[in-house]
Image (cartoon, helix red, strand yellow):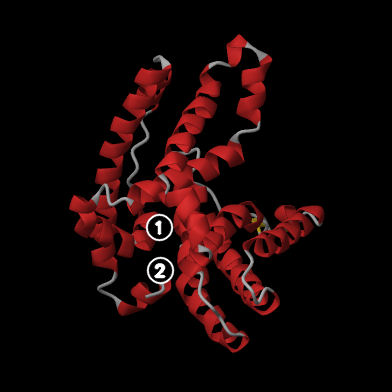
Amino acid sequence: MYSFHMPLFFMVSGFLTYKVYQWGDFLSFIKKKFMRLFLPWVCTIWLVCLVRGAIGYWFLLCLFQISIVGFLLITLLEKVNLKRIWIIDVLIMGIVYVCLRIFHAQEWQFYGVSLGRFVGAFIPFFIGVLLRKHNFLFSICIESAWSYSLFLILFAGVFSSRYLLEYGNIFEHIYNHSTLFLAIVGSFMTFHIFAKNIFVRFRSVLSLLGRKTLPIYMLHIMFVMQIPAVGEFVIMQNAVTSIVLQIIYSVVVSVIAIGLSLLLYRVIIISPHFKRLFFGE
C-alpha cells in the first residue's frame, strides 16, 4: 500500500476537485481551502512535532498548494482548450510540470518547511483531473476489465523486483525506477475496484469513513502501533508470506487507529472553535 497510497490520495483529490471554475470564483475558492486545509495545518503543527518530530502534516500543506495550482490550471485549460481535446490538456499540464522541475520548485524551503512537495503530487493530482474531465480516459484506464488485468500483472511483476535484487542488475534497475509507475498503476487498480462496486455491501461504512477522512488522517498518528519486533519478523519471511502478514497486520492496526481517531474526533468537536481550527468545519 505504501507504494501508492499517497499518490492515490492526490489522484482522488484531483478527481473530486475538477469542475468548470470561473476566474471570479478564485477568492472564494482560496478562502474555502484556507479554512479547510491551511488553518488545520497550522493548528496541528504542535501535534505532529510532538509525535513525529515533523513540522506539521505535509499532505495538508501540499493539498492546499496543489488545489490552488489546480484551480488556476483547470480554469486556464477551459479557456484555452475550448474543444476539450485531451492531448492538449496533457501537453499543457506536462509543460507546467517540466517548468516546475526546471526551476527546482520541489526544493523550495521556508524556515525548515518544505514548500515544494506539491510538485511530487502534481502528476497524480492532474491524472485525477483528466479522468474526471474526459470520460473516455476513465473508461479506458478505470472501467476496462482488460486494463485492470494488465495493470494487475504489471504491478505484481514490477513490485516483485524488490525481492529479486540478488538475481541481477535488471531487477535493481526496475526497482530503482518504479516509484511513479507503481503509484499510477496501483491507483488505477484501486479506482477500478471501487468503480465496480466490489465493496457495495460496505458502502455505508465506507461513506462514513469518506466523510471523516480528514479527521482520521489527522488523528490516526497517535494510535498507529509500531512494534519493531513484529516488523522484523514479517520482513524476514519469504515474499508471499511477508505480504500476507503485512496485509493482516495493517488491517488490524487500521481498524484500531480509525476507531480511536473517530472517537477522539467526537470529543474534540464538542467545542465549535476546535472544530473550526483543527478540522476546518
Toward the bottom, the furthest residue is 24
In 3D space, how far apart are the residues under numbered discs 2 and 1 (Cα atoms)? 9 Å
Instruction: Give the residue displayed 49% in from the left and 72% down from the top.
Output: 39
The image shows residue 158, relative to residue 262, as above or below, that is above
Most foreground residue, 264 or 216:
216
Q: Position of residue 58 (x, y in %)?
A: 55, 56
**What mark, if any, has residue 218 been given in the picture?**
1
Tell me whether the residue at label 2 lies in contact with that at label 1, contact meaning CB atoms closer than 8 angstroms.
Answer: yes
The image shows residue 45, relative to residue 228, as above or below, that is below
Pick whichever of labels 2 and 1 is earlier in the sequence. Answer: 1
Whether residue 56 is visible here, answered yes or no, is no
In this image, 33 relative to 117: left or right?
Answer: left
Toward the top, the furthest residue is 167
**Which structural element holds mark 1?**
helix
Q: Residues within 10 Å of mark 1 (few under 14, many from 20)?
A: many
Q: Residues within 10 Å of mark 2 (few under 14, many from 20)?
A: many
Residue tagged by mark 2?
278
Most foreground residue, 142 or 59:
142
Whether residue 265 is visible here, answered yes or no, is yes
The quadrant of the image that shows the C terminus is bottom left
| Circle 1: residue type | Met
Q: Position of residue 56 (x, y in %)?
A: 52, 57
